Image (tube, grey):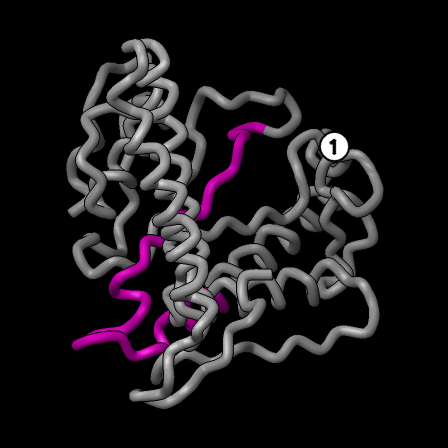
Amino acid sequence: QVFEGVTPQPMGAAPDPNVARRKAILDYVKGDIAKVQATLSSEDRCRLESQLAAVEQLQASVTKPATITAGCQVPTITQNSYDHALTAAAHAKLMVAAFQCDLTRVGVIQCGRGGGGTGDFSMNFNPVMVNALDHGLGHEFDATAKAQLDKMHAWEASYLASIITQLKAVKEGNGTLLDNTLVWWTTDLSVSYTHSCTNDVRQVLAGLSSLQKGRHLAMGGKDRSMLLTSVCQLMGVPTAQFGTPLSGPGGLTGLT
């Protein structure tokens, strides 16, 4: 869907006439809103301003040029059968290409879901020859289960590495796409068999040239709201707080 109607063209190609038409329609709608705005009560004016903001957001979306200039490559995805590993690889390829084409600035890839279960919502690990679900293995204590979990986690790390490698391969400005992208690998649990999500939840940050690399930081029990604040700040979003952090407002120190 993100690449629908996108056709890379060389610099100087004729603009898409549909873009101008979409903008004209929404400009007309915005003009109508402006005409009636002054005659409304303060309550109705607030509602109309909210509607105007929605129209402007829509305009920014639908007038996005369908012709992308040099550097953008629409990815080719060929997959004849459903497989979690192949699907995950396709999602990574699409996300990197969407960043390269500047069609989106944020992407999320979720391999399975919390709570385990069966079916398409649970990640299988056929590439590492583990015929089990990580949810069930997380509640086992024997060496066999641990060895299988280690294989799963190693595959997940290799998948993260493949995304980083793809981002690093794209030249952008004086650096790479990786230099301008914050990669965040996260989970919702620290200890699976107790369902604990409060102590020692590991997080991995990569990419972004301003990050200090190659370190393990112990954050002393600070909650992830502070990390979310830091993520916003690292990407240039001026916010002092995300959510309601139990350990206080502000971001984490020592990331840059």
User: Which quarter of the figure is the N terminus placed in?
Assistant: bottom right
The residue sitting at 74% across, 32% down in the picture is 140
Q: Secondary structure at mark 1?
A: loop
Please give the count of numbered marks on the rendered protein: 1
User: Three-letter amino acid code at disc 1?
Assistant: Glu
Find residue 127 and report its horizontal and vertical position in percent. 72, 65
Find residue 126 and report its horizontal and vertical position in percent. 77, 61
Q: Quadrant of residue 13?
A: bottom left
Find residue 135 and report its horizontal and vertical position in percent. 72, 36
Residue 143 magenta-highlighted: no
The residue sitting at 66% across, 38% down in the picture is 113
Q: Which residues are magenta?
A: 162-191
Q: Quadrant of residue 17?
A: bottom left
Question: From this viewpoint, is residue 75 visible?
Answer: yes
Give left or right: position of 23 versus 156.
left
Check disc 1 and report the residue beneath it: 140
Closest to the observer, 67 or 100: 67
